[in-house]
Image (cartoon, rainbow, N blue to C red):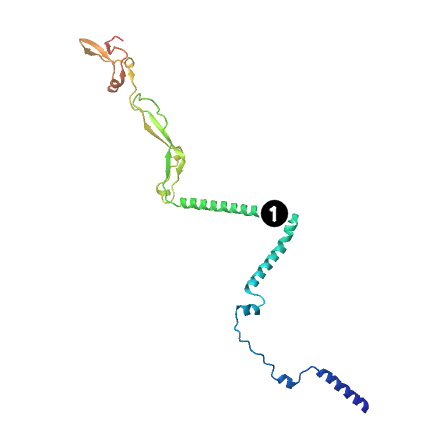
Amino acid sequence: MGEKAEKTKTKNKDAKTQLSVGVPTDQELNAPTLQDDADDQLPSERTENELSDISEEGYKQFLRQETTTKFGAVFSPVIVNPYLRRLAVLNALSWAITIGFCGFVLFQVISIWYGHAAVHHHNELDLPCMFDWLEWGPCSASCRNGPQFPVQTRHVDSKTIVRARGMYVETAPCPKNLETMSDNRSCNVHQCPKLLSTIQFRNDCVQFDGHSVQVRDLTIDDMETVTIDTPDLYRPCNSS
């Protein structure tokens, strides 16, 4: 038993010796380290560049290369493959047509809205009834033949009618028959000329130059417009 215990102690001591090889002792750990001579050179652009592995300009160039590489990796199949290239062109055309159509629709919507707003604003204004007349028509006769005067007629231009708005709806509305309303004026008011032979003789007799005669029934208007086509201004009485 004593020999076995002695052998066990010997083995443990050898194992501890092997583990302690290369491990510094406490005195070695507490010993001062070697002192190097300090470099009195001040930092400069060269020393900073030498201390830095990547400069700012180099970092930017690295980012550009990285970005270019990523885009190239994304679009390289489209550039290499003709089928994908055609699909990309068709897709671009489809997007262009869609954007153009949407822009056209948006323009139409804005135009309609603007027109509606303008009409709405116009309807809110205070406007009386307004319209224009068409041109005068021809005269009904070339001269007056009797007490009635010839007339000209004009009608309302229905395309120019603007209904009353605002406060004028109650105070100055358009007539209900405005579309068919007409206006008249006299024209060719001069008396039509008459032939003397068409004027009848008066029934009563008068004395003229020692004879009893009947004269024609001339009025003041007839005397201004009469045309003498016969010398018979009078005739003897009871000669009819």
Depth check: give the residue in front, 13 or 153. Answer: 13
Q: Residue furthest left?
A: 210
- Residue located at (27% from left, 16% from top): 226
Residue 151 placement (x, y as % from top left): 33, 26
Picture quadrant of residue 122: top left
Relative to 65, residue 214 above or below: above
Residue 156 placement (x, y as % from top left): 38, 33
Depth check: give the residue in front, 42 or 182. Answer: 42
Q: Secondary structure at mark 1?
A: helix
Tell me, yes or no, if residue 177 can be seen here.
no
Q: How many marks?
A: 1
Depth check: give the residue in front, 21 or 108. Answer: 21
Picture quadrant of residue 2: bottom right
Q: Residues within 10 Å of mark 1 (few under 14, many from 20)?
A: few
Left/right of residue 223 with respect to residue 69 in the rendered view: left
Left/right of residue 197 with respect to residue 85 in the rendered view: left
**Would you name the residue on which mark 1 appears?**
89
Picture quadrant of residue 178: top left
Left/right of residue 38 with respect to residue 113 in the rendered view: right
Relative to 153, residue 10 above or below: below
Residue 135 placement (x, y as % from top left): 37, 30
- Residue located at (19% from left, 11% from top): 207
Relative to 167, residue 191 above or below: above
Q: Amino acid at mark 1?
A: Val
